[in-house]
Image: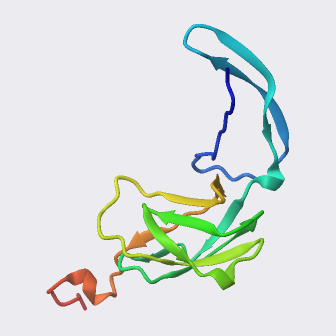
Amino acid sequence: MLSEFEVNGLIYNDLVVTDFNDFTTDAQFWDGQNSYPLPGAIQYLSSMTPVIDSITPNNGTIYGGTTVTFTGLNFDGTPVVLIDGVPCVVTVPSINATSFQCVTGPRLTFPDKNSLTVTFGGNYSLVQDEFLYVMRWSDVRTWGTDLPPV
């Protein structure tokens, strides 16, 4: 017997979502031997899906300390932000239904791949922008013990 089934989040690239329509769809449950149809088992409600459509700035130093503003729709509660697996600390007074800010932490290692996840109460957001850690040419720390080029 299946007592609970939950699906969180979407992963996609280069896709701009402009129309969020509610829908219900069927599911199929397989217990390893038998398949059971579950008509209308999955319901998507756009009003319950946080959507991030803008991130400003979209890059910051690997040393952390960059204040990042996220804007979008359906923000409910305090977000949890991870950029390349590094927590971005949310500044609580900045949170409202359409925007919030966080301050990046230092990224001390190179990730296998760049990633950005934002959750509200465990619900994953649709993220339509990106944030990248960078080493700025103009930052003297980029050049270690060498002098920066002139």
In percent of the image, x 66 and y 38: which residue is there?
6
Most extreme residue toward the left is 145
Q: Position of residue 37 (x, y in %)?
A: 74, 16
> Does residue 38 appear to the left or right of 116 in the view shown?
right
In the image, is residue 19 above or below residue 3?
Answer: below
In percent of the image, x 58 and y 46: which residue is there?
11
Residue situated in front as seen by the camera: 24 or 15? 24
Q: Quadrant of the C terminus?
A: bottom left
**Residue 18 visible in the current orientation:** no
Q: Position of residue 141 (x, y in %)?
A: 26, 85
Residue situated in front as seen by the camera: 20 or 3? 3
Residue situated in front as seen by the camera: 101 or 37? 37
In percent of the image, x 71 and y 68: which residue is there?
77
> Does residue 47 appear to the left or right of 91 in the view shown?
right
In the image, is residue 77 above or below residue 57?
Answer: above
Instruction: Name the quadrant containing residue 40.
Output: top right
In the image, is residue 15 above or below residue 119?
Answer: above
In percent of the image, x 71 and y 14: which residue is there?
36
